[in-house]
Amino acid sequence: MTFSILILVVCLALSCFFSGTETAFTAASDPFMHELEKKGNKRAKKVLRLKKHPDRFLGTVLFGNNVVNIAATAVTTSLCITLLGEKWGIFTSTFVVSLFVLIFCEILPKTIAVKFPNTISLALSPLISALTFLLSPFILFLNALVKHVMNVLGLKKEKIIESAKTELRGTIDLKSDESLKSEKNMLKSVLDLDDVSVGDIMTHRSKIISFNADLPLPDLIEAITHCPYTRIPLWRGKKSNIVGLLHTKLLFRALNENRNDLKNFDIMSVTADPWFVLETTSLLDQLQAYRKRHEHFAFVVDEYGVIQGIITLEDILEEIVGDIVDETDHPMESALNTAPGPDGSVVVDGLSSIRDLNRQFGWELPDEEASTLAGLLLYETERIPRKDSSYCFYGFHFKILDKKGQKITRVLITPPAKESKDANS
């Protein structure tokens, strides 16, 4: 009996240890540990390493805690049955273990750990690091098994990430201060980068300014001089056959260096190879690709390799911070610079991005089926609208003010009256 009591005491002490350790490491301050690590504190380094792999750390702690709790329950049950008989022994052991574990192995150690998380985690880091190392093969097996079960149940990593994004969006929306509207829009735009493709915000091929690489050099230089952009696509044979991307700064530097021998100057010697990306590429992936390649200009192609438009780093930044008007932009070309009328109506370009319109004016036009206003009108009407024709859907009134060929160039949009929106909410 003495041996059983000794085992019970050891199991309860270990349960207290594991419970307090879990809380202490979870509540430990990362900045505090980082500062200690910079000063050469080895224990702080171990704490940060353990927190960097929470699945291994928690697996070790939870495994140890469950083993000692089960052992304590078994020993207590055996002692109580021996002293009180089977009927009362089982009942008494269940009550005693539950009460003892709750008070002395859960509430008390966790309360102490919450008050002194940094001190406790530093003190216990060598022991926990050793346990994590010893149990790592078993813990890795358990983690793999848990992930497999989660996949079977449909609890995949993507769903967990999406749930976390939803929670962040809700947290941002709860900040109702109107003065933070622009900051809230930027934060939500960052969260949406992985859900928006480059095809949704690219500059359409119809708006691309490009030149024939086979033009005589004087004519090509004349055209480039009057072009408002510094990066210009060059093509051969047909406009869809892009052969290079010309940077005007590099061109004029090369012309200056070869000014005595311009007859033999090859324009292709100063062009960069075109970079093609699929229109289904997410903005987050494209942004990371720009950082990796140290570039910020790419041609967007569809699944057949046909050029659909261009995407620049500025386009992605505008998706986050809103429209950026520089010296090459005409103010009236941007829907974001259109002032609403007394009834909230605005006149915008047909190629205006639905996402930009929603963000700027607080609308909720759908962008699942079309990324531009013209695309939305074509999708909803299932025809090419005539000039001066009017349509109503989603509570908005649309009037086609102008067309250029089959392209919708100007649209008057009148949003739902504010009173009716309030009444429906």
Image (cartoon, grey):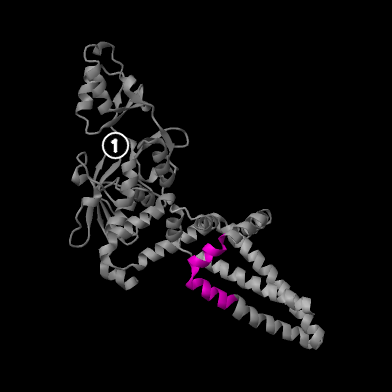
Q: Is residue 334 above or below residue 64?
A: above
Q: Residue at x 69, y 76 (%)?
A: 9
Q: Residue at x 52, y 74 (%)?
A: 112
Q: Secondary structure at mark 1?
A: helix
- Camera-nearest residue between 230 and 410: 230
* Image coordinates for residue 16, horizontal then vertical, percent: 61, 73
Left or right, 294 with respect to 325, comes to: right
Q: Is residue 112 magenta?
A: yes
Q: Is residue 127 above or below residue 222?
A: below
Magenta-drawn segment: 106-125
* Image coordinates for residue 86, horizontal then vertical, percent: 81, 85
Q: Residue at x 32, y 44 (%)?
A: 315
Residue sitting farthest toward the front: 40
Left or right, 47 with respect to 17, comes to: left
Q: Which residue is mark 1?
A: 207
* Image coordinates for residue 101, horizontal then vertical, percent: 64, 78
Residue sitting farthest toward the left: 342
- Camera-nearest residue between 282 and 407: 282
- Camera-nearest residue between 36 and 287: 36
- Camera-nearest residue between 348 and 159: 159
Image quadrant where one finds the N terminus:
bottom right
